Image (cartoon, grey):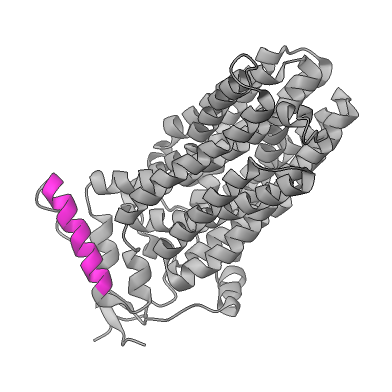
Amino acid sequence: MAAPFNTLIPHRLDRLPWSRFHWLVVIALGVTWTLDGLEVTLVGALAGAIHNSPSLRLSSTQIGFTASAYLLGAVCGALFFGWLADRLGRKKLFTLTVLLYLSATIATGFSWDFWSFAIFRFLTGAGIGGEYSAVNSAIQELIPARRRGVTDIAINGTFWGGASIGALASVVLLDPAVIDPDLGWRLAFGIGGALSIVVLFLRRWIPESPRWLMTHGRREEAEKVVGEIEAWVEVEAGPLPKVQGKPISINPRRHTGLGEVARTLFRTYPERAILGLVLMSCQAFCYNAVFFTYALILTKFYGIEAQHIGWFMLAFALGNLAGPLTLGHFFDSIGRRIMITATYAIAGLLMAATGLAFAQGWLSAWEQTAAWTVIFFFASAAASAAYLTVGESFPLEMRALGIALFYALGTAVGGVAGPALFGWLIEGGQRQDIMWGYLLGASLMLVAAGTEWKLGFAAEGRSLEDVARPLSQASDPAN
């Protein structure tokens, strides 16, 4: 292993002005959330058509379980690929995961029964889960500290750009005047595959994370990558600002053992571990429970035909997209703690009120959609901030695995159970029963708000190495 060395790599990356390079990172890597939003919306908007498909005819409960299969796949994929991303690097993994996603989502369109559909959804989820860990860590390590909050939250919010694409696609592909709906829902799953081909091309230009190279002793390669990024930015922005800050000393390591990861989580940063788990699990339950089953609510309780579901989902998705894009910069200016607490709390209170209104039958289909749109304007920013929080909370050597672990735990605790529970409640046909599910979701959002207020920490404008000291960083500079 290489000898200890001093480096200014983090400071050099953080002082760069925003440039076309950063836009490339945002587009080529951030598309992960667009793909996830597309997948989730397709299953939600296509639920009625899949339920009525002559070749599948899945029940409401089975549709709920296939949604859970997708999320379970995401959990397994996040853990496995997150572990690999910290060992093998970000770049190798975000190529492998998008290939898995591409293959599995196209295969979903060829499903022939419940089990084949569920298995392909599991594999699609595994690709997306792996993307979250490898891509989230790479983005945070390449974006300047002063723009990390707004960038990360906005990128997470593009989930709803994918949701909008899925909603519009379902309107066309489920219209009997355009195409046979049983063929249309199958073709819809090819959209993500087509986008993935473009993504593979763009990612050829994204370098390995210099921060990852730095901690793994590949100093010369890290310096070369940073120099190339600086040259790229300098052509566009002119002379770069002077590097500020003292060098940090790195004792390189090949990998970080699971035992050290566990000690870091539960001994060094126990409060951050609790905070990450609460934020991730609470938002996962609310989002997945509501969104995966929203089409079933519209068809069963409001009589909306399957080919019209996409218009309702589009309005819902646009409200969710607007939240992070509108509120994101406040997480850097006002601060993480205040904004995360506020967005979780507002979403929880509005969700409780809407659940009660639904139980009383006071809302039409469009009024119900408008209420959810307002709720998730705030909840979308809150959920995006949860991913930002777990990415910033822990040292660089375990960042991808940390993101994967909390994504997996949060999704397993709050996400996998949500769609199955709500699918079962909807099949029962009683508004009062579903109301209790919504009130449970609202309570969880309020619990998350209180936890953030108690355990939240300031990360805005601070270097990742300042927020969480790298495990390989020596106490004193090396000679």
Magenta stretch contains residue 227? yes
Closer to the camera, 243 or 433?
433
Q: Measured along the vertical axis of the image, is residue 319 above or below residue 361?
A: below
Span colored in magenta: 221-237
Considering every residue shown, the one lying at the far left of the view is 239
| Quadrant placement of the N terminus | bottom left
In the rendered structure, the answer to whether residue 68 lies left or right of residue 77 reads right
Residue 372, image x and y in percent? Answer: 64, 24
Q: Measured along the vertical axis of the image, is residue 303 above or below residue 6?
A: above
Residue 191, image x and y in percent? Answer: 52, 36
| Quadrant placement of the C terminus | bottom left
Residue at point 63% right, 35% down? 186
In the rendered structure, the answer to whether residue 84 lies left or right of residue 120 reads left
User: Is residue 246 visible to the viewer in this orientation of the structure?
Assistant: no
Residue 354 in which image quadrant:
top right
Main structural element of the magenta stretch: helix, strand or loop? helix
User: Is residue 328 visible to the viewer in this orientation of the structure?
Assistant: yes
Residue at point 73% right, 26% down? 48
Residue at point 60% right, 65% down? 270
